[in-house]
Amino acid sequence: MENKDRYFKALIENQGKLNEIDLGEKIQLDENETREIISQLLSEHRIGYEENSFCKYSIINKKRK
């Protein structure tokens, strides 16, 4: 999904400055599509939920062996 990749890249560049919905709107996604992409990224373990952050989601860095 092209929008999922765009959102993931935007999330990396965002560094927690915008919340997750505003970030989606910035790249022209509506709220429902943004939430769907977030749920997909969570299920793929590419992002994680952070309760005490302005942007509630962050990138999960996988350590390579």
Image (cartoon, rainbow, N blue to C red):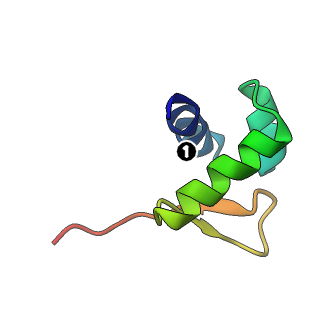
Image point (64%, 59%), residue name:
39
Image point (57%, 55%), residue name:
40
Residue 13 on image: x %, y %: 58, 38
Q: Quadrant of the C terminus?
A: bottom left
* Nearer to the camera, 41 or 62: 41
Few, some or many residues within 10 Å of mark 1 (<14, 14–19, 20+): few
Residue 41 on image: x %, y %: 55, 56
Left or right side of 52 for 65: left
Q: Quadrant of residue 64?
A: bottom left
Please say whether residue 17 is visible from this viewpoint. no
Image point (84%, 42%), residue name:
31
Residue designated by label 1: 12
| Residue 6 against residue 57 in the figure, above or below | above
Image point (73%, 43%), residue name:
34
Label 1 sits on what residue type?
Ile
Residue 21 on image: x %, y %: 82, 45
Q: Residue furthest top?
A: 28
| Secondary structure type for disc 1 | helix
Please say whether residue 34 is visible from this viewpoint. yes
Q: Quadrant of residue 50?
A: bottom right
| Residue 62 against residue 6 in the figure, above or below | below
Left or right side of 44 for 47: right
Q: Quadrant of residue 12?
A: top right
